[in-house]
Image: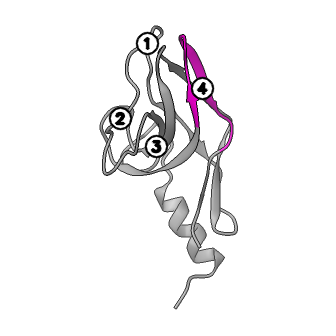
Amino acid sequence: MGLIAVGLNQMLDALDETPAAPAAGIGFLSLHTDVIGSGSGGEVTGGSPAYARQAVVWNAAAAGSKAITGTAVFDVPSGTTIRRVGLFSAVTGGTYFGDAEITDETYGGQGTYTVTAATISVT
């Protein structure tokens, strides 16, 4: 038995949580230097300005997918190689929902990393 788009969309929208009232939904993106596993292992730290998870807002799901609105800009410390973007429920700690591999990007000096698009899909 499979779900049609209405069911998939409802599932995805149930994961959504705006950062103004984070509780259990996906409201923050994170950057990682390695495979995350089941938590925040390898999450970027340090820098000046300091790295921090970034709040995101999601569009309503359609056709079994949902995407962030706007962009998320992260401060990244010198000597860091970014390999993954994570999905979390809180600015620190919180529930880990998953992650996505990205093309490695290495920083020789302090810089920024911008996520311009992120989509979650259920098939």
Question: Marks 3 and 1: CB-CB under 8 Å?
Answer: no
- Image check: 64 left or right of 82? right
Q: Secondary structure at mark 3?
A: strand
Q: Which mark is residue 47?
A: 1
> Would you place residue 123 above or below residue 46 in this image?
below
Q: CA distance from mark 2 to mark 3?
A: 11 Å
Mark 2 crowdedness (10 Å alpha carbons): few <14, some 14-19, many ≥20: some
Residue type at the position of mark 3 = Gly
Residue type at the position of mark 2 = Gly
On the question of residue 19 being in view, the answer is no
Residue type at the position of mark 4 = Tyr
Q: CA distance from mark 3 to mark 1?
A: 19 Å
Q: For this rendering, which residue is in front, 8 or 31?
A: 31
Mark 1 or 2, nearer chain start: 2
Task: Work out which residue is located at the far top of the displayed protein and give it.
Answer: 48
Q: CA distance from mark 1 to mark 2?
A: 15 Å
Give the residue number, with chain letter if any, for mark 4.
113
Q: Quadrant of the C terminus?
A: bottom right
- Image check: 91 left or right of 6? left
Q: Which mark is residue 86?
A: 3
Q: Which residue is depicted at the point 48% across and 10% down?
A: 49
Residue type at the position of mark 1 = Gly
Give the residues drawn in magenta, as a range.
104-117
Mark 3 or 1, nearer chain start: 1
Mark 3 crowdedness (10 Å alpha carbons): few <14, some 14-19, many ≥20: many
Q: CA distance from mark 1 to mark 4?
A: 13 Å
Mark 3 or 4, nearer chain start: 3
Q: Secondary structure at mark 1?
A: loop
Question: Marks 1 and 4: CB-CB under 8 Å?
Answer: no
Give the residue number, with chain letter if any, for mark 2.
42
